[in-house]
Amino acid sequence: MTAAPATPKGIKTRERLIAASGAVFARKGCAASGVADICAAAGLAVGGFYRYFASKEEIIQALTRELRDELIRAVSGLPQQKNAEAEALAVAGAFFETTARRLDSFRTMREAEAGDEALAKDFYGPLAEVLAGRLGRFVPGPRAAAHAWSLLGSLYFYAVKFQVWDGGAVPARAAEAAARLCGRGLSRKTFPWWEPALAGPSRAKPAPGDTAGLMITAAEEVFGRCGYNGARVAEIARKAGFAAGTFYLFFDSKEDALEKVVMRMRDCLVKKASAYSAGAANRVEIEAMAFRALFDFIREHPYGYRIMREAEFMDRKLADAYYGYILRNYAAQLRKTAAAGDFNIDDPELLALALMGMGHMLGMKRVLWGGFRGMTENELLKAVFEGIKK
């Protein structure tokens, strides 16, 4: 890690480099950007860059930490509110205002976290702790953490949808929806408890003769472990147990392989959620089982987050074929099957986005990072479904 500059001029130059890097990364993407691009945008000779940062990766870390710290300052500086819903609404306003002002940094963080778990933990962990501290006035410790990560998930997906994908502002109704779901919970109905044995079937490995299944499974692992740019066709084929040329019997190119992996993951998730909720008595039970299906899906596809994030930044159409497809169908199903009073917000799109965000963040924390120790998955989701109500 390069030492911080000691002079006012050095501090300003470092800040200029960070600001320039955000604009460059937002325009070209982290993977396609180089130190020369950053220096050109900052009006600085390339050699000067290394007085302040050892590498492109180090400036990405600095950029994301600055965004994290600014979010923490914005949330920490809020006056205390009288109840959890008002607290969550104030947090939502501060979160969206900061991500809008630092949108380049927010975009960069989202791309960089996919291939750097340490960066993701360093960004989300301290921010969630601050949220848990504010919500902890209304709910005991372990539950406060569950509500903090859940709220962070809904805010994150609202910011991504409205600020990043749509290129606009987050509507006030989204902040209100996030606050209501945090304070009042997902539903007023009794949380549907279940036994782990009822969770549903696990993914079966491809049979030895299923060449296509073996190849796409190998592609998923290699893309996840090495990243798209680091993945090699020969390694995918070798991992599947075949010669390199066999790859082209199933995929036109590496890009085609990534697309097929993404579509397979999407279909696996949708089918798993459907299978888990097959015996549900109502829409609330369906959503409870969908969370459990997602957690098990993440266990079975531990590289899923990285693959989807890289796919999103490589090809927006591919991202829409995954996230957009799930969102549109999720909202349509809620609109069609949810009864009046099932959930504490009535807007199907906002509810679907919130559920996707909560599942994303809770799954990452619970399954991949081993979080919420001392709480079973039932207890974790019961807290989210019931809310704080204080």
Image (cartoon, helix red, strand yellow):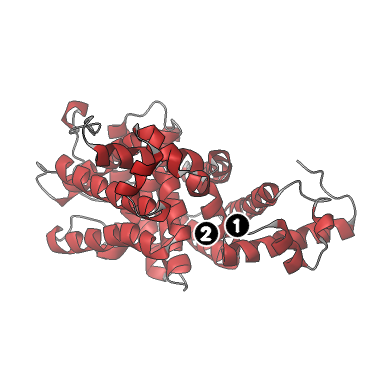
Nearer to me, 287 or 147: 287
Q: Look at the numbered disc 2 and give the secondary structure of its residue.
A: helix
Q: Tell me the quarter of the picture where residue 372 sits.
A: top left
Q: Position of residue 71 (x, y in %)?
A: 59, 55
Residue at the image point whose x is 58% and y is 67% from the top? 27
The quarter of the picture where residue 166 lies is bottom left
Q: The residue under label 2 is which amino acid type?
A: Phe
Q: Is residue 288 above or below residue 322?
A: above
Looking at the picture, how far across and down is residue 128, in whole percent? Answer: 51, 44
Q: Residues within 10 Å of mark 1 (few under 14, many from 20)?
A: some
Whether pointer 1 and pointer 2 mark residues with C-beta atoms closer than 8 Å, the reply is yes
- Give the amino acid type for the residue marked by disc 1 in the picture: Ala
Question: In this image, 29 relative to 154: left or right?
Answer: right
Task: Describe the element under mark 1 as helix, strand or loop.
Answer: helix
- Furthest residue in direction bottom, as rendered: 168
Mark 1–mark 2 Cα distance, whole angstroms, equals 7 Å
Badge number at residue 95: 2
- Observer-nearest of 228 and 81: 228
Which residue occupies the foreground of this view, 130 or 70? 70
Task: Please give the label number shown on residue 250.
Answer: none
The answer to whether one can see residue 252 in this image is yes
Q: Is residue 89 visible?
A: no
Mark 1 or mark 2: which comes first in sequence? 1
Q: Residue at 49% across / 55% down in the picture? A: 81
Mark number for residue 74?
A: 1
Residue 151, x across and y down, in percent: 42, 50
Q: Name the residue located 32 percent from the left edge and 35 percent from the top edge.
A: 300
User: 34 above or below 240?
Assistant: below
